[in-house]
Amino acid sequence: MGDTTPDFARKGSGGGASLANLSAFAPGRGGRTVAEIAAIALTALVVIGGAELALRLFDVPLYVMPPPSAIAAALVTEFPSIAPHLGHTLVELLSGFAIGASIGLVLAAIITQFPFTEKIIAPYILLLVTTPMLALVPLLILRFGFGYTPRIIAVALASGPMVMINAATGFRRVDAAKIALARSYGASTLQIFWKIRAPMALPMILVGLMIGAIFGLLTAVGAEMVGGGFGLGNRLTTYSSMIQMPQFFAVVLILSMLGIAIYLIFFLIGRRWASWEA
Amino acid sequence: MRSAKLEIDGAVKAYGDFVALSDCSFSVGRNEIVAILGPSGCGKTTLLWSMAGLHELTSGEIRLDGVPVTGPRPEIGLVFQEANLLPWRDLDANIHFPFEITGKRPDHGLIAHLLDRVGLSGFEGAMPGTLSGGMQQRAAIVRALAQEPQVLLMDEPFGALDAFTREEMNRLVEDIWMEARTTIAFITHSIEEAVFLADRIVVLTGRPGRVSRIHEVDLPRPRTTEIMASREVFDLNAAIKAGITGGHRSGKAA
Ligand SMILES: Nc1ncnc2c1ncn2[C@@H]1O[C@H](COP(=O)(O)OP(=O)(O)OP(=O)(O)O)[C@@H](O)[C@H]1O
Ligand SMILES: [Mg+2]
């Protein structure tokens, strides 16, 4: 009596569209040691110092590539004039992301309840995910002018589908046994959703939110470069047209920091609420 | 003969065209322990889920105290194959999960007693992923027993455990039963486990699943090592084994 047959109580595994690795949420193995921190700091010092030295040694002109010290100086002296633009970019990113992510989450929760509907609309979702929403920005500007509106719409359009497709993967991870467990105590559909499906989907939802936020940032900056006189993207085009490279790279540095901040936020949330996955 | 607590009356379950369970009939007496024994894939889980009201039968009926079971019932507790703890909740939250669904107030004294009984005191804050298979299975049993069910159904509760842990768990179930005298039906692959725990053993054959034989186990409790080493137990083991291989042959010939 040893033949194996498929067991329907087997753990469900979501196939498809995960774009990032869940193991990113795995708790780190203890704290960093002093030696590790020293090694990290030393490497940074060598890289930045090396760049500084090389750029000065070969007398690379400022408009080609400014040395790190010039960028740092520009970051400090120009920050007061850059800060309002950072504010604008954050407004676009946060409101566009909030709108896109909420709609994406709700749609994912709904469509995964109806596998048939899901099959029909899947190609359109894929289209939304793969189309760079930046392409629509000129059209949006034509329709909504040069204010926040077209940018917020573009950010929402870029982040929403990313959140949706990942969240849907999460919600699709039906585990028949866990749902039966809830049903065996008389759980309602709503209880099953909040107490089984949602927590089971959470790790994938967080991945979706992180990717959605990064795509939102890219789209916000891109939209700012296309038109309108404000935002970090606008600073990039302005500084480069005036060949103010230290200022230009100071803005690039701020954008990198924004991206890293987004990653860190979701990483920490994931470590707190979704580390059971690993 | 004791009165029937749970009756399975001509149960048939088909998944589409595939008949998983065909005309199963037996009953589980009040305070009785019944083992359901059968080869892998013969429809044991299908049967147990039906007994728990989780499957709609294609035909036939399950009755609890004479009343047809048409959906999950609070009097029936089910321990799933492979613990089935919620991995995002710690042990304590897992044990409280059913209370959140039913809205019943948990009996903290009982939960503490049960945890102590199965040797899980102090592990309330542990996440399931950090526990061994045996510990997870014990937690799943506590989760079911904390609901104070009249009938406890267990799906291969110790199937994944090593022989030592398994024997320990069998003694634990016997102890719990001697203490609470609930009605128990459990699925197993192991003839030894069935003989050790059960008052009666229902042997199923597969494709489609149906009852091939029912053995009475007329041994005193607690079932000591001496009793389990007796001639009577040896003969019973042999009879069950013979019945299973015989069932297989006729199944293949058909
Ligand atoms: N939801 C389902 N849909 C279709 N077929 C199913 C479903 N559930 C079970 N089956 C099939 O029914 C048969 C019996 O399955 P079941 O899980 O009840 O067997 P089992 O005796 O519990 O097996 P095991 O010992 O491996 O746990 C198997 O062939 C299985 O593939
Ligand atoms: Mg099974």
Image (cartoon, grey):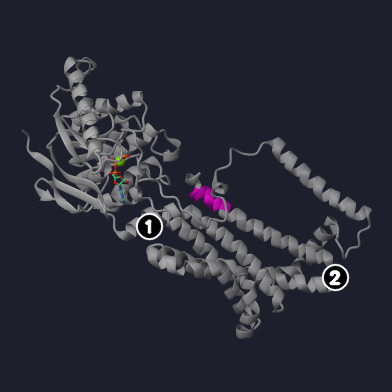
Up/down of A250 relative to A173, above or below: below
Is A210 placed left or right of B224 in the picture? right
What residue span does the magenta drawing correspond to? A267-274
Location of residue A94 (image quadrant): bottom right
| Ligand 2: image quarter | top left
Secondary structure, mark 1, is: helix
Q: Mark 1 points at which residue?
A: A194
The one nearer the camera, B76 or B109, is B76
**Callout 1 touching callout 2 (CB < 8 Å):** no
- Answer whether residue A97 is magenta in the image: no
Q: Residues within 10 Å of mark 1 (few under 14, many from 20)?
A: few
Q: Could you tell me residue A95's position as x and y percent?
A: 56, 70
Is B152 placed left or right of A18 in the picture? left
Q: Residue at x 77, y 47 (%)?
A: A44
**Chain identity of mark 2:** A
Q: Which residue is drawn at 21% across and 35% down?
A: B250
Whether residue B127 is visible here, answered yes or no, is: no
Up/down of A102 relative to B56, above or below: below
Q: Could you tell me residue B248's position as x and y percent?
A: 24, 34
Q: Which amino acid does label 2 sit on?
A: Ile
Q: Mark 2 points at which residue?
A: A243
